[in-house]
Amino acid sequence: MPNLNLREQLAGLHELQQIDIKILALHRKLESAPLKIKKLGEGLQIYEKQLNTKEEALSQAGKEQRSKTAQLEMEQEQRGKYQSQLRGVKTNKEYQALDKEISFLQEKEAEIEDEILASMLLVDQLKEELQQQQKVIDTEKAKNKIQKGECEKEIENFKAEIALHQEERKRFFSKVDRNLMNKCQEWLKRNGTGFVSLVIDNACSSCRITIPPQILKESRKYERIMFCPICKRILYPLPPSASDEVPTDEEASS
Ligand SMILES: [Zn+2]
């Protein structure tokens, strides 16, 4: 007479295992969620860094423009002085010398004016680029906010699902041996797979090895726990009613 208690226990353990696998998968998702959120922030940081570089360039171009403008004013002032002096000169030689200085300063001023113009163009260009960059960041921030919200919602859902499964597994506490249950949990934590392996078509469904006839026969008696000789998992041959849909070779030939 089959030990119904063991058969029921194996059925319970297998069912519990399905729940525990789901819980484990949810925990893994939960663990990777903060990393996902962190990565979202990192993407934004790159854009912000680019923005800072441009802001620095703009500040530098502004300084350059102000410095050149100050230099131009100085040259203009100096030229003004020479031009006043020009009205008071007595000799032709003095006149020529001053005139030469004035021409030199005029050339220099023209050069500085070109440089100022270039600076102004650069400032305008950088301002335009900064505006574009800010738009990109704003869009990215808005996108991030939505994605972060989704991630957080996902985390809440994972937690709720876990709680639900935890509640679900409570109903097995009275049906399954605690010691056996703990062993299954330890195996699952260590290997990430179930400790109870279904016997399908006379084979261990986990490692696919065909189970030696003697072990198979023993396991079907449900008198004591039988282990797969290869993967060392607990063998659980589905009871006849459950395995009707998938008849084993032995049953098909009998
Ligand atoms: Zn196996």
Image (tube, rainbow, N blue to C red):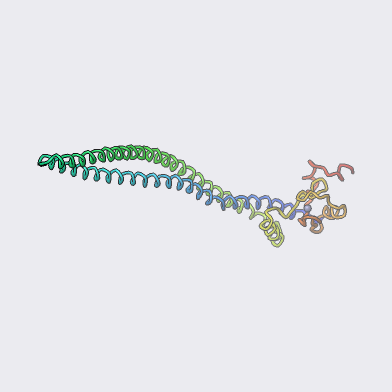
- Residue 209 horizontal side relative to residue 102, left or right: right
Compare residues 13 and 133 and report the one nearer the observer: 133
Residue at (53%, 51%) from the top-left corner? 35
Q: Quadrant of the N terminus?
A: bottom right
Residue at 49 percent across and 46 percent down: it is: 40
Identify whether 144 is placed above or below 215. Answer: above
Q: Position of residue 32 (x, y in %)?
A: 56, 51
Percent position of residue 42, x then y? 48, 48
The spot of residue 200 in percent (x, y) is: 79, 46
Q: Residue 131 or 154: which is nearer the viewer?
A: 131
The total of numbered circles placed on residues is 0
Left or right position of 172 against 209: left
From this view, report whether residue 174 is shown above or below residue 88. Answer: below
Residue 253's quadrant in the figure? top right
Q: Nearer the viewer, residue 212 or 50?
A: 50
- Identified at 47% across, 48% down, the residue is 41
Q: Nearer the viewer, residue 100 or 222?
A: 100
Residue sitting farthest toward the right: 254
Residue 61 picture location, percent across and down: 33, 44
